[in-house]
């Protein structure tokens, strides 16, 4: 009996964890839209920049990359996705977008394939 209870509790936990991350995803996408990122990015498809899911897959398991990507979004740059973009640069976003928002956005992008 207690075993079934714990299965039910685990299932309930998974459902609530799932809806929490759905809310986070909506908030992150709203922030990305507000910040102008979605003019060049989408999650699943290359637009001007690489698909954010592909960015997340490329760096999967590399816990040190977040700072590098935060800096890239702040100062812009190119060279990591040339075969996808044809060499178009990522524009600099600091100080147009706050450091905290950039960290949230990069954290969201990196979480996609985890
Ligand atoms: C004008 C188009 C454009 C906009 C707007 C844009 N990006 Fe990009 N983004 C790019 C391009 C092009 C690349 C590929 C750069 C490269 O080749 O290294 C890129 C790459 C990236 C990468 C991967 C960087 C790497 O080195 O692998 C991240 C993360 C990223 N963008 C996040 C964002 C965020 C967050 C925003 C909004 C604040 C944003 N981008 C807005 C064009 C854009």
Image (cartoon, grey):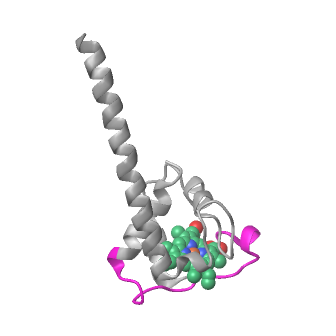
Ligand 1 shows up in the quarter that is bottom right
Q: Can residue 31 be seen in this view?
A: yes
Magenta-span inclusion, residue 26 = no
Q: Residue at the spot x=42%, y=74% of the render?
A: 31
Q: Residue at the spot x=42%, y=66% of the render?
A: 28
Q: Which of 45 and 106 is in front in this view?
A: 45
Instruction: Give coordinates of residue 109: x percent, y percent.
Output: 49, 62
Is 1 on the left-hand or right-hand side of 86?
left
User: Vertical placement of 103 versus 74: above or below?
Assistant: above
Q: Nearer the viewer, residue 77 or 38?
A: 38
Instruction: Name the dominant secondary structure of the magenta segment.
Output: loop
Instruction: Give coordinates of residue 12: x percent, y percent.
Output: 32, 33
Q: In which quarter of the image is residue 51?
A: bottom right
User: Vertical placement of 59 versus 73: above or below?
Assistant: above
Instruction: Give coordinates of residue 35: x percent, y percent.
Output: 46, 81
Question: Looking at the image, how many numbered discs can be counted on the residues?
Answer: 0
Magenta-span inclusion, residue 84 = yes
Q: Nearer the viewer, residue 27 or 59?
A: 27
User: Vertical placement of 11 versus 58: above or below?
Assistant: above
**Magenta region:** 77-100
Q: Which residue lies furthest to the top in this view?
A: 1
Is 4 on the left-hand or right-hand side of 32?
left
Is 92 on the left-hand or right-hand side of 81?
left
Q: Nearer the viewer, residue 78 or 108?
A: 108
Q: Quadrant of residue 83?
A: bottom right
Q: Residue at the spot x=72%, y=74% of the render?
A: 85
Which corner quadrant holds the N terminus?
Answer: top left
Q: Residue at the spot x=59%, y=57% of the render?
A: 53
Q: Which residue lies furthest to the left in this view?
A: 2
Instruction: Give coordinates of residue 99: x percent, y percent.
Output: 35, 79
């Amino acid at each position: 009996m207690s075993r079934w209870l714990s299965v039910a509790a685990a299932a309930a936990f998974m459902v609530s964890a799932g809806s929490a991350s759905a809310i986070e995803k909506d908030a992150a996408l709203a922030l990305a839209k507000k910040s102008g990122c979605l003019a060049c990015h989408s999650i699943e498809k290359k637009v001007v920049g690489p698909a954010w899911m592909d960015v997340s897959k490329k760096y999967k398991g590399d816990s040190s990359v977040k700072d590098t990507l935060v800096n890239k979004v702040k100062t812009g740059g190119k060279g990591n996705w040339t075969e996808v973009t044809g060499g178009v640069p990522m524009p600099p976003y600091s100080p147009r977008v706050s450091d905290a928002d950039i960290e949230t956005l990069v954290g969201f992008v990196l979480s996609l394939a985890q």
